Amino acid sequence: MMKFNITTVLVVFFITIFSFGQDANKDFVEENHMKDWGFSITPYALIAAQSTDVGGEKIRQSFNDLTSLTNSGFQIRAGVRYKKFLFTYDGTFADLGHKTIEEPLLIDISINQNISDFRFGYIVYNNYKFDEEEVIKGWSLTANVGAKYWRNKINLDWALVNDDTTIVDGSFSELQEWWDLMVGINTKFIISNKFLLGVDLSAGGFGIGDASKFAYDFTYLNSFKIRKHIIIDAGFRNFRYNREDGEGENELETTVNVLGPLLGISFVL
């Protein structure tokens, strides 16, 4: 039981958060001039603070705490649109670690993390007319469904020492992975041919199999077109999930809540 609890706490303590609501439908053009195909790729960063409740314990982390734990990482989103059909992929790849040297206890923790979000969407409605008399030049509504995959490989080495003598040491490793079904909607409001507002909301998990009991993801995004194929994205994101691991006496409930500003740059065709 001790190993299980420690492992779960390590995962939620080191967790990094990903993705924000956008897709390949950033054409900034009138509907009758829109191409059949659209593509986008977006490197991005979420500047987040995090709260975690696990097994009755409460962990609070600032952005500085999270960045100090990240050895290396990469976050990217890619999307493709054909007419009104969309597919997006959102990936986080990170190596996280921390060494604690407080004699007599030495701890070296590392987590290899992969978070992948796959979505299929359909543009239910769009109206990009760019009427000069209207404040909002056009808007769209997209529905999407997909799955989010979590994979954490945890390694921990520890030792009890006295001066330069190791009294006892040990290590363990564990792989944790699960899928969450996600469904959502995305709406965009074009203010001008250079400025777009977007809101994205999705929910999932629903306790299906080993999935989270419930998860949601909310994003507000401002998109600024600075060049024909370059868009700057800036906004805010709040993400939360609740899940249970183990059974009986080993059951442990975890709730993670993350919020903060985000920034990315989109290259679109």
Image (cartoon, rainbow, N blue to C red):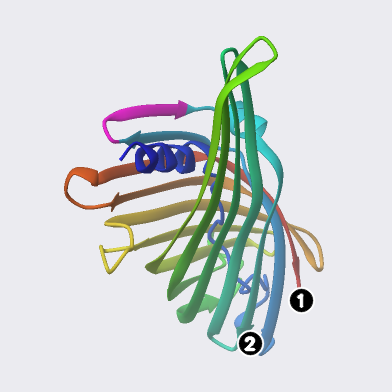
267 lies left or right of 247: right
Instruction: Residue 22: give x, y in percent of width and height.
Output: 57, 64
200 lies left or right of 131: left
Q: Residue at x 28, y 68 (%)?
A: 209
- Residue that lies at the very extreme toward the top in this rendered image: 163
51 lies left or right of 269: left
- Specify whether residue 131 is in view: no
Residue 57 included in the magenta stretch of the image: yes
- Residue that lies at the very extreme toward the right in this rendered image: 227
Residue 43 included in the magenta stretch of the image: no
Q: Residue at x 80, y 68 (%)?
A: 229
The three-letter amino acid code for the residue at tag 1 is Leu
Check disc 2 and report the residue beneath it: 32
Mark linked to residue 38: none
Whichever of callouts 1 and 2 sits on the residue coming sooner in the sequence is: 2
Q: Residue at x 56, y 56 (%)?
A: 19
Mark linked to residue 269: 1
Q: Main secondary structure of the magenta part?
A: strand
In which quadrant is the C terminus drawn? bottom right
> Is residue 256 shown above or below 221?
above
Instruction: Residue 149: give x, y in percent of width and height.
Output: 48, 65
> Is residue 211 shown above or below 35?
above
> Is residue 41 shown above or below 34?
above
Q: Name the foreground residue: 156 vs 167.
A: 167
Instruction: Residue 157: give x, y in percent of width and height.
Output: 59, 35
Q: Name the foreground residue: 157 vs 91.
A: 157
In which quadrant is the N terminus drawn? top left
Q: Which residues are magenta?
A: 55-60
- Specify whether residue 236 is in view: yes
How many labels sit on residues? 2
Instruction: State which mark lies toward you, 1 or 2.
Output: 1
